[in-house]
Amino acid sequence: MIIGARGPVGWNLMEYFLDHHPDWDVLGTSRKPPTVPTRADYVCVDLLDGAATKEAFAKHGDVTHVVYSAILDLPRMAEAWTGQDHIGTNLAMMRNALEAIEASGAPLENFAFLQGTKAYGVHLGPIKVPARESDAMHFPPSFYHAQQDYIFEAQKGKNWSWSIYRPQIVCGVCPGAPINMVQSIAVYCAISRELGLPLRFSANLYAGLVELVDARIVAGAMAWGAHNLDKSANQVFNIANGDVLDWNNLFPKLARHFGMEIDRPQSICLDDMMADKGPLWDNMVKKYDLAPLTYDEVKGNWQSIDFIFRMGNQEPPPIVSTIKLRQSGFHDCRDSEDMFIDYIKEMQDLRHLPR
């Protein structure tokens, strides 16, 4: 059962299991239906409705492994990460999900859930580099703390284990996801070209290094964990591609891919500058015969992109160690620049972006 299957991690994990592990029955769940078809069984339920969640999950009492990747973010997401209402909401969703699974009588073996580098406080400023799983989490509050405390307490005396995965910035193809960095940046490139402008990236990135992870690497790591509970049970793992990305190297490649000139960086706040581009995108959908996705479904969250751009200029840059995961047995890696271009090509093949 993949809870939050409409997001970049959940969607790619669902498709990964379908493609690579056909002996597993795969069930996806989310509040809204996916924007594109899937071969997996699928349940739509609002996790904030405990009774509805129990009713929906009661029909799936054979669940052995759960991946919890659901999150309810607010429009001004960076302001909400430490807000008590936000923490309470995300904790209630997880509690309702786990209680519904246990109430179904499912023979649960492992409950895996996602955190990220915010566990180390990257949203608050520079962190220890490289961040290791044994490092202390940042000063509370955050919903990571609340969810982790809840799972640790709920597991006591039970036969199931937990696993925590902390991916770096996740990149992948997942239309309709609230956070999708590759697609957001590609939409910015396409709109810049449509306006007849050269490609300019934010001056905040001028000296920025960042660490990314392909959603399919995350999916592979979690699939490895599901098959190797002797190594992944009750463990925390950082996940990243295995390299670092210099935005100064990537943006010229993006410009070449879109057939654009590249110009000097400028101070750009995408959250402000892209707010009025919906009508332009609607015209582009018609002009280039794109898939009928709305601007909201393709743009992602500009505030999150602005935050990632600013984060790239932290000193030292936020880098995590993935040695623990590799020493435990998972070794997949990915070139981050190639990943960006390959995903954009895939989105163009799907007609989510103009060529």
Image: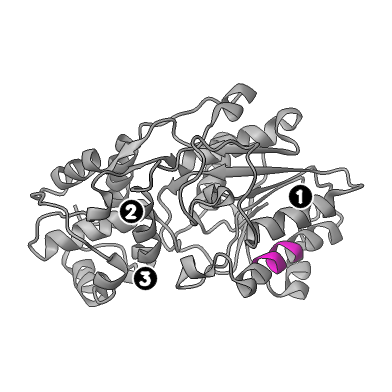
Q: Nearer the N terminus, badge 3 or badge 1?
A: 1
Element on which disc 3 rests: helix
Residue 115 relative to residue 193: left or right:
right
Residue 146: where, in percent of width, then height? 71, 60
Between label 2 and label 1, give the one nearer the viewer. Answer: 2
Q: Residue at x 33, y 53 (%)?
A: 309
Front in this rendered view, residue 282 or 340: 340
Figure check: 93 above or below 262: below
Element on which disc 2 rests: helix
Residue 355: where, in percent of width, then height? 19, 52
Front in this rendered view, residue 257 or 126: 126
Q: Which residues are magenta?
A: 90-95
Q: Which residue is mark 3?
A: 296
Front in this rendered view, residue 28 or 142: 142
Determine the CA span between mark 2 and mark 1: 39 Å
Is residue 58 at all visible to an observer of this figure?
A: no
Amino acid type assigned to the residue bearing label 2 in the image: Phe
Q: Residue at x 45, y 64 (%)?
A: 178
Q: Which residue is mark 2?
A: 309
Amino acid type assigned to the residue bearing label 1 in the image: Val
Could you say which disc has been placed on residue 153 in the image?
none
Between label 3 and label 1, give the one nearer the viewer. Answer: 3
Q: Residues within 10 Å of mark 1 (few under 14, many from 20)?
A: many
Residue 75: where, in percent of width, then height? 45, 73
Q: Which residue is mark 1?
A: 63
